[in-house]
Amino acid sequence: MSRLFAAAFALTAVSTTAVSAQAPEGTTVEIAIARSVVDRMPVDTASVFAADVGQVACWTRVSGAAGQTIQHVWIHGENEFPVSFEIGGSPWRVWSTKEIPPEWDGEWRVEIRDSTGAVLASTTFRVGE
């Protein structure tokens, strides 16, 4: 199996495509959590990471939202860590990374929000056992 096919298969396994009732008509969002992003594509996607992972990336492909601002909002417990992006075209790929100390284990969520705060898509992942 080629490396490219394997990466595409891994992305499909944990990627979520979502259209929120609050999202503008025709807007779609794909989201994946990975260890890194290479050539604008997620690498080593997963839904569970070791406590010593150090850093993970949230990769997003947005269609139908050119010219708008979106946020990746990393959520752990009561803590939120927002990262804003301008969408320059359609489709458009963006990603953010989050350093995760070993003591911040447990459930995480990343929400993709538009400029009004509406959740366009979300995904969860776990750090640690």
Image (spheres, grey):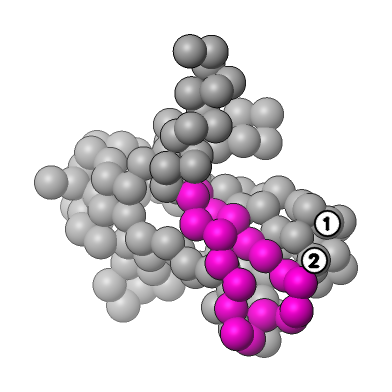
Q: Residue extending furthest left?
A: 129
Q: Residues within 10 Å of mark 1 (few under 14, many from 20)?
A: some
Asked whether residue 83 appears in the rendered view, the answer is no
Residue 30 in magenta stretch: yes
Tell me if residue 107 comes above or below residue 10 in the rendering. Answer: below
Res. 27 image quadrant: bottom right
Label at residue 48: none
In depth, the one of 60 and 81 nearer the eye is 60
In depth, the one of 10 and 81 nearer the eye is 10
> In the image, 46: left or right of 110?
left
- Name the secondary structure under disc 1: loop
Image: magenta residue range: 15-32
Going by the numbered disc 2, the residue's amino acid type is Gly
Residue 19 in magenta stretch: yes
Which percent across, then down, holds residue 13?
42, 42
Label at residue 90: 1
Q: Residues within 10 Å of mark 2 (few under 14, many from 20)?
A: some
The residue wearing badge 2 is 64
Q: Residue at x 70, y 59 (%)?
A: 62
Tell me if residue 28 comes above or below residue 125 in the rendering. Answer: below
Q: Residue at x 56, y 67 (%)?
A: 18
Which percent across, then down, holds residue 85?
71, 62
Q: Residue extending furthest front?
A: 1
Q: Residue at x 49, y 42 (%)?
A: 12
- The earlier-in-sequence mark between 2 and 1 is 2
> In the image, 116: left or right of 15?
right
Which percent across, then down, holds residue 81?
47, 67
Going by the numbered disc 1, the residue's amino acid type is Ser
Q: CA distance from mark 2 to mark 1?
A: 6 Å
Asked whether residue 106 appears in the rendered view, the answer is yes
Tell whether label 1 touches label 2 (CB within 8 Å): yes
